[in-house]
């Protein structure tokens, strides 16, 4: 693959694109959807599968090495499984993030598609807590989906948003991940859909809790652009990661942009600067698309601006793409 054609004003190369295919989700986690009323994007404004596949066909020549399909919840969208099979055939380095609710029935097709990896969001193993956090009594469905996927050999990681109200879930989640041989990553809450407030739990606090029972040995980054700092727990042999945008920013190694489900490119999660790809996509205009990518990168700041405002006042996390 050729080197990336895209470089931002600070010398960071773009080689990773996250594409949201829907803003819909059966869950109502507060860090993705606010408590106040909000509107979903009308169907006619959502990226068509054909548009995304065309974009994927351009990426290898542009030096894009990795794509992650996100939402909302991507598996909720009609026709998503045939789309993923086509997408992975077109762009083999394809990943997906899911809440796991539809994972069990989708797993055989995901295996057929040979996705490079699936990240499953799982913040708690307590059924009551899960229902309170998500608004859905769906924990057993998620756990069954995880185990089905692992039984089929699908590469999988578990992401847990660190929250003070789920502090007691750190060790159960570690045990769950260790028993299945998967990496567990704790993610700091970001002030996007709402202000975490007293619920915020820093990397240091999670690590302090873990160290009451286990040791943490630093590991090298998975790759130079990875957002996760990794540690090995020698007592269990497992790997645990921390994605800590607020307490340990990783902006200096950021190599990604996000494309929202209505076809807007956003060079930083914390920024509201967006450029529309939709018209150029519908016209199948590669030169214009490449220019829009470059123009978006020109807007990418040296650092995120999460700490410069109370919380994100525009789109929700579910609308931007988690």
Image (cartoon, rainbow, N blue to C red):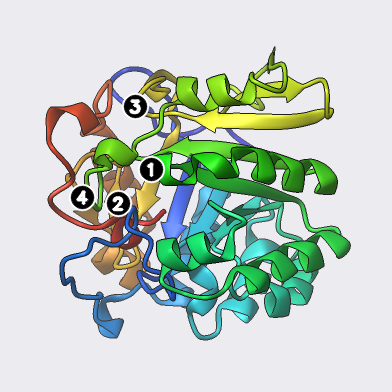
> CA gap, disc 3 to disc 4?
22 Å
Residue 63 appears anywhere in the view: no
Identify which residue is drawn at 34% across, 61% down: 318
* Residue 71: quarter of image: bottom left
At mark 3, the secondary structure is loop
Label 2: how many Cα within 10 Å (few below 14, some 14–19, many 20+): many
The residue where tag 3 is placed is 246
- Whichever of callouts 4 and 2 sits on the residue coming sooner in the sequence is 2
Residue 245 relative to residue 35: left or right: right
Depth check: give the residue in front, 301 or 169: 169
What residue is shown with label 4?
274
C-alpha separation, residue under disc 4 versus residue under disc 2: 5 Å
**How many numbered marks does the figure carry?**
4
Residue 11's spot in the image, x, y percent? 37, 18
The local crowd at label 4, few if under 14, some if 14 to 19, many if 20 or more residues have their Cα within 10 Å, is some
The reply to whether the C-beta atoms of the residues labelled 3 and 2 are less than 8 Å apart is no
Q: Tags 4 and 2 in contact by the CB under 8 Å rule?
A: yes
Q: Please name whichever residue, 115 or 207, is drawn nearer the observer in this view of the structure.
A: 207
Q: Residue 106: x, y in percent?
A: 69, 76
Q: Tell me whether circle 2 and circle 1 mark residues in contact (CB < 8 Å).
A: yes
Disc 3 versus disc 1: nearer the observer: 3
The residues tagged by marks 3 and 2 sit, at their Cα atoms, a distance apart of 23 Å
Q: Which residue is mark 2?
A: 265
């Amino acid at each position: 693959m050729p080197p990336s054609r895209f470089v931002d004003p600070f010398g960071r190369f773009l080689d990773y694109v996250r594409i949201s295919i829907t803003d819909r989700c059966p869950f109502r986690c507060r860090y993705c959807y606010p408590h106040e009323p909000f509107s979903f994007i009308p169907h006619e404004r959502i990226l068509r599968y054909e548009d995304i596949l065309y974009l994927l066909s351009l990426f290898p020549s542009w030096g894009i090495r990795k794509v992650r399909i996100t939402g909302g919840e991507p598996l909720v969208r009609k026709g998503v499984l045939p789309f993923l099979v086509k997408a992975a055939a077109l762009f083999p380095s394809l990943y997906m993030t899911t809440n796991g609710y539809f994972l069990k029935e989708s797993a055989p097709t995901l295996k057929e598609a040979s996705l490079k990896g699936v990240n499953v969001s799982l913040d708690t193993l307590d059924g009551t807590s899960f229902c309170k956090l998500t608004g859905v009594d769906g924990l057993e469905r998620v756990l069954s989906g995880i185990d089905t996927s692992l039984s089929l050999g699908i590469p999988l990681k578990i992401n847990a948003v660190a929250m003070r109200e789920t502090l007691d879930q750190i060790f159960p989640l570690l045990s769950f991940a260790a028993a299945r041989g998967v990496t567990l990553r704790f993610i700091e809450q970001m002030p996007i859909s709402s202000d975490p407030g007293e619920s915020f739990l820093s990397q240091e606090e999670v690590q302090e809790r873990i160290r009451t029972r286990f040791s943490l040995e630093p590991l090298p980054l998975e790759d130079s652009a990875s957002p996760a700092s990794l540690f090995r727990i020698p007592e269990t042999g497992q790997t645990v990661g921390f994605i800590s945008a607020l307490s340990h920013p990783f902006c200096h190694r950021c190599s990604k942009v996000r494309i929202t489900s209505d076809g807007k490119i956003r060079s930083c999660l914390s920024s509201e600067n967006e450029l529309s790809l939709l018209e150029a996509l519908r016209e199948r205009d590669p030169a214009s698309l490449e220019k829009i990518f470059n123009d978006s990168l020109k807007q990418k700041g040296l650092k995120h601006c999460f700490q410069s405002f109370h919380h994100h006042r525009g789109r929700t996390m579910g609308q931007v793409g988690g």
